[in-house]
């Protein structure tokens, strides 16, 4: 028997399981495909904040979660003995024109007011970071110290090992017991749409590529024209990703990978000639509201939903684990209004 059964062993399911275990609950995770089998088993791992402007509960929640991430992942690693690839090394973004520079400087002022000294957003000359930076038409970059990187596959394995070390079960099949949390990714959103007889979300395919390139030890992640370039501690650099609403093959890669590489090399010429280690594709769950979808399953007592972490799942995971564990185990509802299940109905 278990106090909590979690359907889905992606980042949401595993993080919630970990938070419940740390509160003393007995936990069972069930996923027929195994740990990190969906989009949580990706390769990019860019944990980046929303821009510091038009502040709202969603941005505040994400900020708090990104701040909490270091303690969250260090506790996981201490229990599992497996590195998650987490490191808060910040991010550099290119600035395309004078308008972008003006906006970036305004955001620097806003970040000082909103980020409470816990992180910084500033504009600096590209010459300040000559060894690892995207080319910038204005010669200026944005640096933020809130962004972090993670190795998604390693992080899921680290979480899974920590869960087992604390006595949790991770199974490919088994019965539900106790409260049941559905963290079943994009297929779960499709199933939920069918059961509720209304569209609540869908899947958006993304393709990414992993290169054999060791960036400098201090290197932050880079962002250029919608492209994420993330150096990992294992001597690889990930580039992503595409966004494809229409697709026939959820895990198939195609010529769009080559375009990603070309764009990355144009932005960071030092990547030219780097060996391609892996081409990856997966489908990310996108709730109708675009925010995570959290809370009780409508008209199904004892069942809960944790889904829809489109592009921000790993960054939001520490905060989502906290509020879902509090809801399921204590009945305390701290879920922001925009994240509630009904926001996607």
Image (cartoon, rainbow, N blue to C red):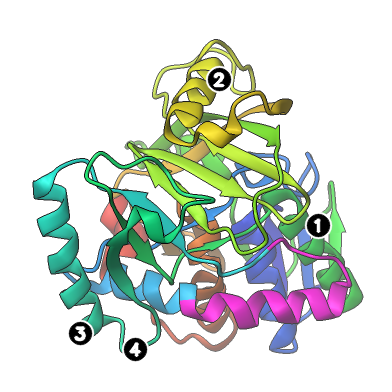
Q: Would you say residue 195 is visible in this rendering?
A: yes
Tell me if residue 166 is in the magenta stretch: no
- Distance between the alpha carbons at the discs numbered 2 and 3: 40 Å
Magenta region, residue range: 67-85
- Distance between the alpha carbons at the discs numbered 2 and 1: 26 Å
List x then y, in percent, for residue 93. Answer: 35, 51
Element on which disc 1 rests: helix
Element on which disc 4 rests: loop
- Distance between the alpha carbons at the discs numbered 1 and 4: 33 Å
Mark 2 vs 1, N-terminal side: 1
Q: Which one is nearer the viewer's eye here, 252 or 142? A: 142
The answer to whether 219 appears left or right of 213 in the picture is left
Tell me if residue 71 is in the magenta stretch: yes
Element on which disc 3 rests: helix
Which label is found at residue 257? 2
Instruction: Please say if the residues under marks 3 and 4 sit with CB atoms less than 8 Å apart.
Output: no
Mark 1 vs 4, N-terminal side: 4
Which label is found at residue 117? 4
Reading the image, the residue beneath label 1 is 157
List x then y, in percent, for residue 94. Answer: 32, 47
Q: Which one is nearer the viewer's eye here, 135 or 23? A: 135
Report the quarter where the N terminus lies: bottom right
Figure quadrant of residue 164? bottom right
State the residue at coordinates (59%, 55%). 182
On screen, residue 26 above or below 51: below
* Crowd class of label 2 (few under 14; some 14 to 19; many from 20; radius 10 Å): many
Tell us which disc is closer to us: 1 or 4.
4
List x then y, in percent, for residue 135. Answer: 37, 40
Instruction: Please say if the residues under marks 2 and 3 sit with CB atoms less than 8 Å apart.
Output: no
């Amino acid at each position: 028997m278990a106090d909590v059964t979690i359907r889905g062993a992606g980042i949401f399911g595993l993080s919630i399981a970990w938070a419940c275990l740390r509160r003393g609950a007995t936990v069972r995770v069930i996923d027929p495909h195994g740990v990190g089998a969906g989009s949580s088993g990706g390769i990019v791992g860019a944990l980046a904040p929303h821009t510091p402007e038009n502040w709202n509960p969603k941005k505040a929640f994400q900020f708090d979660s990104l701040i909490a991430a270091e303690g969250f992942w260090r506790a996981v690693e201490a229990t599992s003995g497996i590195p998650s690839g987490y490191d808060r090394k910040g991010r550099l973004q290119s600035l395309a024109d004078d308008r972008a520079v003006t906006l970036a400087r305004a955001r620097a002022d806003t970040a000082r007011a909103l980020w409470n000294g816990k992180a910084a957003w500033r504009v600096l000359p590209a010459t300040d970071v000559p060894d690892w930076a995207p080319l910038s038409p204005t010669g200026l970059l944005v640096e933020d110290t809130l962004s972090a990187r993670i190795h998604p596959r390693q992080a899921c394995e680290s979480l899974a090992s920590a869960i087992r070390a604390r006595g949790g079960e991770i199974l490919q099949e088994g019965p539900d017991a106790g409260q049941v949390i559905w963290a079943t990714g994009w297929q779960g959103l499709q199933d939920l749409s069918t059961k509720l007889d209304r569209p609540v979300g869908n899947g958006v395919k993304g393709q990414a590529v992993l290169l054999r390139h060791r960036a400098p030890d201090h290197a932050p992640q880079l962002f250029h024209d919608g492209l994420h370039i993330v150096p990992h501690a294992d001597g690889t650099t990930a580039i992503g990703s595409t966004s494809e609403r229409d697709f026939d093959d959820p895990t198939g890669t195609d010529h769009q990978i080559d375009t990603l590489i070309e764009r990355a090399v144009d932005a960071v010429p030092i990547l030219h000639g780097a060996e391609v280690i892996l081409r990856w594709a997966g489908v990310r769950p996108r709730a109708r509201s675009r925010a995570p979808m959290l809370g009780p399953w409508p008209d199904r007592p004892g069942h809960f939903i944790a889904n829809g972490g489109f592009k921000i799942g790993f960054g939001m995971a520490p905060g989502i684990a906290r509020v879902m564990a509090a809801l399921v185990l204590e009945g305390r509802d701290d879920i922001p209004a925009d994240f509630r299940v009904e926001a996607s109905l």
